Image (cartoon, rainbow, N blue to C red):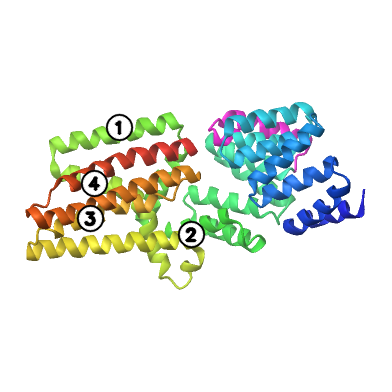
């Protein structure tokens, strides 16, 4: 092994990926077909989310060594990050076929199956990996996820405790334990593990988000929202759509039976989208909570808070003064809270742009409705009605996008 390659390996272990990439390029200048160097280079690009560079290196490695299981593993990870679970599963299966004794491969395979909500098969793959190494942290964590989702919660917690006994410094395992406690309604225990996870790895967003959820779950209303979120997260995409359609039909029936019941149901449904950013708004002004929010979360919370404030003020002013243009302004800002709260939720940039486009259309149509109301002295003009239809359609679009990405 050359000195440069050895140094690159040390840099990778230290998570100094930028420095490792520079060193690997120096080595590859004279040894362009060195698959070990190409593997490390692709791994570094993946760790830095440089997917295009990683894919180029992986394809280069496969062209040089088409039977190297490591490049199939890396391609699987790349596709996993891109949420292409079907192809990710095919590539990790090929990696296992080429080298069936690497427990980490089974852990990745189990992770992919969990994301596809195939919990029983995910448990099987995790246990196959543990047969080679009972202490493999990824397999232990994936096994606990599978067991928990299969309603074998005691076994899930036992597995996580065993994982922490073998490696108490694993931040991911602490975060996993925190989420399991949170889902079980034990906020204090969850906070303990989230704090430890962030002490071990301050950049672990999964633990940071868990701590935010645990703090907010101290309030009863948010606990109910979390239970709903966890419940929906365990359902298949098809079942999620069945539930959403049933809720929609229920609101239609309620509208015929009782307008009051319809309003209550509508508020409850809308609150499932808004409770996150609204609760973040309270954290935004909390002495400690604001440090747990990302810039994007704070920006969304402030926007939603501002829209709700404008809606409340314009609605109140309309009730007092009766100025016609205030009603479409109130309705427009109220309608915009839903898309503004959710348009940044998708992982894929293309999906985010779709939601942003619909949000802009709602805003433009709503403001056009405000202007039109001044001209015709009627609050319900065509632009405002179109904005309402766009808002209604947005709910189905965002549900469809998010369910496909899960």
Q: Residue 219 sits in which quadrant?
A: bottom left
- Indicate which disc, 4 or 2, sits on the residue closer to the N terminus: 2
Circle 2 crowding by C-alpha within 10 Å: few under 14, some 14–19, many from 20: many
Left or right, 88 with reference to 15: left
Marks 3 and 4, how far apart at CA: 9 Å
Identify the residue at image location x=24%, y=63%.
310
**The residue tagged with tag 1: helix, strand or loop?**
helix
> How many circles with numbers are drawn on the protein?
4
**The residue tagged with tag 3: helix, strand or loop?**
helix
Circles 3 and 4, Cβ within 8 Å, touching? The answer is: no
Please state which of the two labelled residues, at mark 3 or mark 1, is closer to the viewer: 3
Marks 4 and 1, how far apart at CA: 25 Å
Q: In this figure, which residue is indicated by the disc labeled 4?
A: 387
Circles 2 and 3, Cβ within 8 Å, touching? The answer is: no
Q: Where residue 405 sits in the image (x, y, percent)? A: 49, 38
Circles 4 and 1, Cβ within 8 Å, touching? The answer is: no
Q: In this figure, which residue is indicated by the disc labeled 2?
A: 212
Main structural element of the magenta stretch: helix, strand or loop? helix
- The answer to whether residue 53 is magenta is no
Q: Where residue 377 sits in the image (x, y, percent)? A: 7, 55
Query: What label sits on residue 367 in the rendered view?
Result: 3
Marks 1 and 2, how far apart at CA: 31 Å
- Indicate which disc, 3 or 4, sits on the residue closer to the N terminus: 3
Identify the residue at image location x=15%, y=63%.
316
- Indicate which disc, 4 or 1, sits on the residue closer to the N terminus: 1
Q: In this figure, which residue is indicated by the disc labeled 1?
A: 246
Please state which of the two labelled residues, at mark 4 or mark 2, is closer to the viewer: 4
Query: Which of 176 and 322 lies nearest the eye of the viewer?
Result: 322
Marks 2 and 3, how far apart at CA: 35 Å
Q: Which residues are magenta?
A: 113-135
């Amino acid at each position: 092994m050359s000195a440069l390659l050895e140094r690159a390996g040390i840099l990778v272990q230290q998570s100094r990926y930028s420095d490792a990439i520079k060193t690997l390029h120096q080595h590859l200048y004279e040894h362009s077909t060195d698959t070990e160097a190409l593997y490390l280079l692709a791994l570094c690009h993946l760790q830095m989310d440089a997917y295009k560079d990683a894919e180029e290196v992986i394809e280069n490695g496969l062209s040089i060594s088409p039977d190297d299981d490591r490049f199939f593993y890396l391609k699987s990870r790349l596709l996993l990050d891109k949420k292409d679970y079907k192809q990710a599963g095919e590539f990790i299966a090929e990696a296992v076929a080429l080298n069936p004794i690497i427990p980490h491969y089974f852990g990745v395979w189990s992770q992919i199956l969990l994301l596809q909500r195939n919990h029983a098969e995910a448990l099987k793959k995790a246990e196959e990996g543990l047969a080679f190494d009972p202490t493999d942290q990824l397999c232990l964590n994936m096994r606990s996820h599978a067991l928990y989702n299969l309603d074998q919660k005691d076994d899930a917690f036992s597995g996580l405790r065993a994982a922490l006994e073998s490696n108490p410094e694993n931040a991911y395992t602490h975060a996993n334990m925190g989420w399991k406690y949170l889902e079980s309604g034990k906020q204090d225990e969850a906070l303990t593990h989230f704090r430890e996870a962030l002490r071990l790895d301050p950049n672990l967003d999964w633990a940071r988000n868990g701590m935010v959820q645990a703090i907010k779950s101290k309030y009863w209303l948010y606990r109910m929202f979390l239970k709903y979120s966890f419940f929906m997260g365990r359902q298949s995409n098809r079942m999620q759509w069945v539930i959403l359609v049933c809720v929609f039909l229920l609101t239609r029936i309620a509208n015929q039976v009782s307008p009051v019941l319809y309003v209550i149901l509508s508020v409850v449904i809308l609150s499932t989208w808004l409770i996150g950013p609204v609760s973040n708004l309270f954290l935004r002004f909390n002495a400690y909570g604001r440090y747990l929010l990302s810039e994007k979360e704070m920006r969304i919370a402030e926007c939603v808070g501002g829209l709700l404030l404008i809606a409340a003020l314009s609605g109140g002013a309309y009730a007092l003064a009766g100025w016609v243009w205030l009603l479409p302004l109130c309705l427009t800002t109220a309608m915009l809270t839903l898309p503004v709260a959710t348009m940044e939720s998708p992982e894929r940039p293309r999906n985010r742009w779709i939601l942003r486009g619909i949000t802009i259309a709602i805003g433009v149509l709503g403001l056009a409705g405000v202007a039109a109301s001044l001209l015709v002295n009627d609050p319900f003009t065509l632009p405002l009605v179109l904005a309402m239809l766009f808002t209604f359609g947005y709910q189905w679009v965002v549900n469809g996008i998010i369910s496909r990405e899960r």
